[in-house]
Image: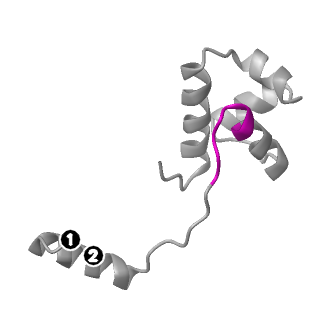
């Protein structure tokens, strides 16, 4: 999954938490965070510390992968090749 916004990250965390059958309260306790802070993360609000986000992802069996985004030129070239059926 590609995440580019706080809301997308929050939705991914919420979806995984629900998939695992965890309540917000249980997850918050597990990662030593307030329930309110977790609610803010899941709603894409607030400004959590990176360590809090990483702890949350780890507790949910998720990881963050950082990669460069393709430049506009690369995106345009990929689009041309895809339209031609060359990829």
Give the overall secondary structure of the magenta segment: loop
Relative image position of residue 7 (x, y in whole percent): 57, 43
Image mark for residue 19: none
Q: Is residue 28 left or right of residue 42?
A: right
| Residue in the image at 59% along x and 44% along y | 9
Callout 1: helix, strand or loop? Answer: loop
Task: Kindly identify which residue carries mark 1.
Answer: 87
Earlier residue among tags 1 and 2: 2
Q: Quadrant of the C terminus?
A: bottom left
Rounded to the nearest angstrom, the CA distance separating label 1 from label 2 is 8 Å
Q: Is residue 69 left or right of residue 79?
A: right
Q: Is residue 15 left or right of residue 78?
A: right
Reply yes or no: does residue 59 show up in magenta.
yes
CB within 8 Å, label 1 to label 2:
yes
Instruction: Please report the bounds of the magenta region as a residue range.
Output: 57-64
Q: Quadrant of residue 61?
A: top right
Task: Kindly identify which residue carries mark 2.
Answer: 78
Q: Quadrant of residue 25?
A: top right
| Residue in the image at 82% along x and 42% along y | 52
Q: Is residue 52 left or right of residue 45?
A: right
Here the colouring is one colour
């Amino acid at each position: 999954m590609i995440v580019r916004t706080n809301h997308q990250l929050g939705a991914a965390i919420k979806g995984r938490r629900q998939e695992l059958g965890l309540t917000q309260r249980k997850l918050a306790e597990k990662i030593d965070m307030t329930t309110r802070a977790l609610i803010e993360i899941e709603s894409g609000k607030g400004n959590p510390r990176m360590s809090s986000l990483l702890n949350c992802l780890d507790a949910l069996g998720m990881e963050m992968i950082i990669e460069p985004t393709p430049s506009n030129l690369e995106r345009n070239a990929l689009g041309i090749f895809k339209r031609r059926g060359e990829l």
